[in-house]
Image (cartoon, grey):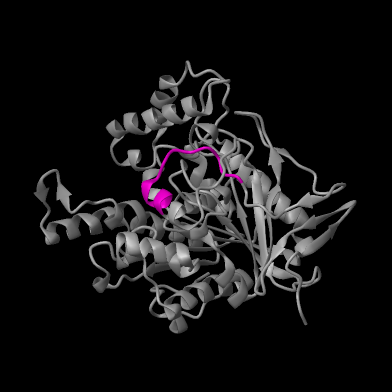
Amino acid sequence: MSVPNTPVWTIPGGKVSGRGTPKVWQATGLPYASASRWGLPVPVPFSGRDFDAREPSPVCPQVSFPLIDEVLDDLEGRPRTDENCLNLSVTVPAGTSSDAALPVLVWIHGGSYVTGGGDLPIYDPTALVVEQRLIVVSINYRLGLFGYLRHGDAPGNLGLLDQRTALRWVHENIAVFGGDPQHVTVFGESAGGDSVAHLMIAEGTRGLFRRAIVMSAPLGLMSRRDRMYVAMARQVQDLAPDASVDEVLAATDRLQRMSLRYGLRAGMPFGPQYGIDPLPKERDVDDARRSAASIDLLIGHTDREAALFVPPRLGRLPLRPAVRERVVRRLTSRIYGTPARRFAQRHSAAGGHTGRYVLRSKPANGPLAGAHTTDLPLVFPGPAWDSIVRASGPAWHATSDEGRAMRTVLAEFARSGTLDERAHAPVFVHALRS
């Protein structure tokens, strides 16, 4: 049976026109909400109109990230930016019927809460969708000063509120595309993984997702940040609500530099703030996490995350390899490993179905082996990662077998909340436990 390359989905009072290949159908750039600058997200009705969903979602205006910029220029150009960026994209196996009831994975991109976008080519979900026969929803949300600092008229946590609104959209509408709203797993990497961890305890998210996958989240940076946030807010107290986009981005850059005085936390100075809707006060976080035990959790990281951030030289002085390796291992443990283990232990102690993993690196891939982001080409293989390997070395190279193993792990967990540790020994060091 042939499948159309311009799929159409019927919705109440309208239709959605997407784009297709022989492998997948996609509806891109669907608005899930609208918002004024520093305003709360207002859901956009998904009925009573037609949607042309054939263009990639615009991303939030953002500061530059040279490696990603280079890859985008090499492939298809940089994505369009727009403050009106509260859109999502849906990718399904080609030919999926509306009654297929497939499991749904909602992807939250990383980028230190200041950069990135759900439709970037480094997050091409085709292999995951086709191999594992499931649906991937990729979302955009507000970044940097547009979404993550309480100051002036900005209430703070807007990016997290955007994500919650997107999850409500998925719960209410994914059945149109053949998804099962009762089998939604939210997953993300880096700042996206941190977002997932916070959505688990956010007010108003109960029932929106059944499982959570927290990948390479720098949880060790996210506590006791109030002094830094207050200082950052003071620096932009005179920023006008109608400041130009360039002025807001320049302020974002200044705040990132200013935050360096706060040590490790400056590695990701923007992010969710406790005690501001929809999050509890920081002293109440442990109680909130215990109340999230009904959510199945899978959490993990690579074994040398910090290798991406520890340079081989300090100024003109080269770091001896053994010294650099000790620093890499210590920072990886402090920022990623120990917090992930404690997170999993707390979830399990509260009665939650919990699993933890560590992705082992290949020494042959050089000093960046197992570094932060080296898990991404396993999940989202494609030409973008080939470009990164050419530009930055073999650390981001993944074989087809390694990638399929990781995608199988994610899909098994999304479908049933279970894993076969023996089948994925190169990936996992700890199986799920209740």
Queried whether the magenta region covers residue 59, the answer comes back as yes
Seen as rendered, the residue at the extreme right is 13
- Residue ID at (58%, 43%): 141
- Residue 140 in picture, x, y percent from top left: 59, 47
* Residue 291 visible, this orientation: yes
**Could you tell whether 49 is left or right of 122 in the image?**
right
Quadrant in which residue 20 is drawn: bottom right
State the residue at coordinates (64%, 61%): 210
Q: Is residue 200 magenta?
A: no
Nearer-the-camera pick, 323 or 225 = 323
Q: Position of residue 111 (x, y in %)?
A: 45, 48
Quadrant containing the N terminus is: bottom right
Counting from the top left corner in percent of width and height, residue 310 is at: 24, 51
Counting from the top left corner in percent of width and height, residue 386 is at 41, 66
Measuring 87% from the left and 52% from the top, which residue is drawn there? Answer: 14
Could you tell me what secondary structure mostly forms the magenta stretch? loop
Q: Which residues are magenta?
A: 58-70
- Count every numbered label the image shows and give the total: 0
Could you tell me if residue 375 is visible in this image? no
10 left or right of 422 in image? right
298 or 85: which is nearer to us?
Answer: 85
Report the residue at 90% width, 51% height from top: 13
